[in-house]
Image (tube, helix red, strand yellow):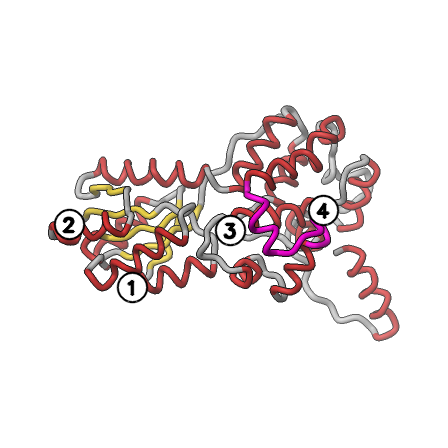
Amino acid sequence: MTPPARTLNAPVITVVDPDERTRVDAAGTGLFYAIHRETVAEAHAELKRRPVSAVLVSVARCAHEAERRVASVVREFPMVPTVALLGTTLPTPLALMQLGQAGVTRLVDVRAPSGWMRLRHLLTEAAAQEVERQTLAAVRAEVGEAPPDVWRFFEAVLDRHDPAHTVRELSGRLGVVPSTLMSRFFRAGLPAPKRYLSYARLLRAARLFEDPGHSIADVATTLRYSSPQSFSRHIRLFFGVTAGQFRREISGEKMLERWMAELVRPHLAALRTLRPLALKAGMPARTPTARPATTLPPSVRDRHAAWQARAR
């Protein structure tokens, strides 16, 4: 059975008046959560640190000194919609002109309830463009009917806001032992779970690189690589190119096509019958949370470390 899409919970950065923050939070219920910042400069810095779905800027907050900052946000992050909110504080004609000069083309009048509905509609469209949602929708379209286990796996792999980076993390969230998850994919003739995780990470990298405001170091930090060098090695391992070449040659759309061509389309029959999380008779149920750290005797610590390395 193909499940319905999940409720959106996308982050947006706001630079709005203090009395508008509560209304923005209320408008985002079930759709987005707001990361409130005091200045456009702070919002610009936040964009470099994390992927977000949109930037909301109060027209009244866009004084002349912020115009260049707003223009930088629009120019450097064209894939992130910048939406101007016309609130209770009426702007001057100069402020509206400065927004246009900065490249802001979306203006929503939120002085009436219909304005907040319009804002939700705009942000729903923005969230639908997230690469993880596009990928999950493409997988559903190709696979069609599949066990719920399969959709739980893909949703966990393509979790935008708290992505797993190791098989151990992924297994903990799915409530299955790492070795069990890996062996079931192996027996079904599917790529290893680790490969799905790696490709999901590179999907995000390709999407982030579409915004010129992100440097290679920014993307490496956002995706939790230990260093830009580690990120570059990961790209070279899968594509045989440098991070700079990857940025120039592989867009989010191309990376999505590679995901489908290598991880989904050749394996449709297996994915339609896979039960990677099913419990067999006599197997204990495992709570889907990360396993707490344990202290091991020195005599078995080395063997345990080796097993952890294989699980990752």
Under circle 1, the secondary element is loop
Gap in angstroms between the C-alphas marked 3 and 4: 20 Å
The secondary structure making up most of the magenta span is helix
Amino acid type for the residue under numbered disc 4:
Arg
Amino acid type for the residue under numbered disc 2:
Thr
* Neighbourhood count class around disc 4 (C-alpha, 10 Å): few under 14, some 14–19, many 20 upward: some
Q: Counting residues from the N terminus, which is met first, the one under dot 1 or under dot 3?
A: 1
Gap in angstroms between the C-alphas marked 1 and 3: 24 Å
Q: Counting residues from the N terminus, which is met first, the one under dot 4 or under dot 2?
A: 2
Label 1 sits on residue: 38
Residue at (71, 37) in percent of width and height: 262
Residue at (37, 60) in percent of width and height: 44
**Horizontal and vertical percent position of residue 216:** 55, 60
- Left or right of residue 38: residue 311: right
Q: Counting residues from the N terminus, which is met first, the one under dot 1 or under dot 2?
A: 1
The span shown in magenta is 236-252
Under circle 3, the secondary element is helix
- Left or right of residue 169: residue 127: left
Label 3 sits on residue: 208
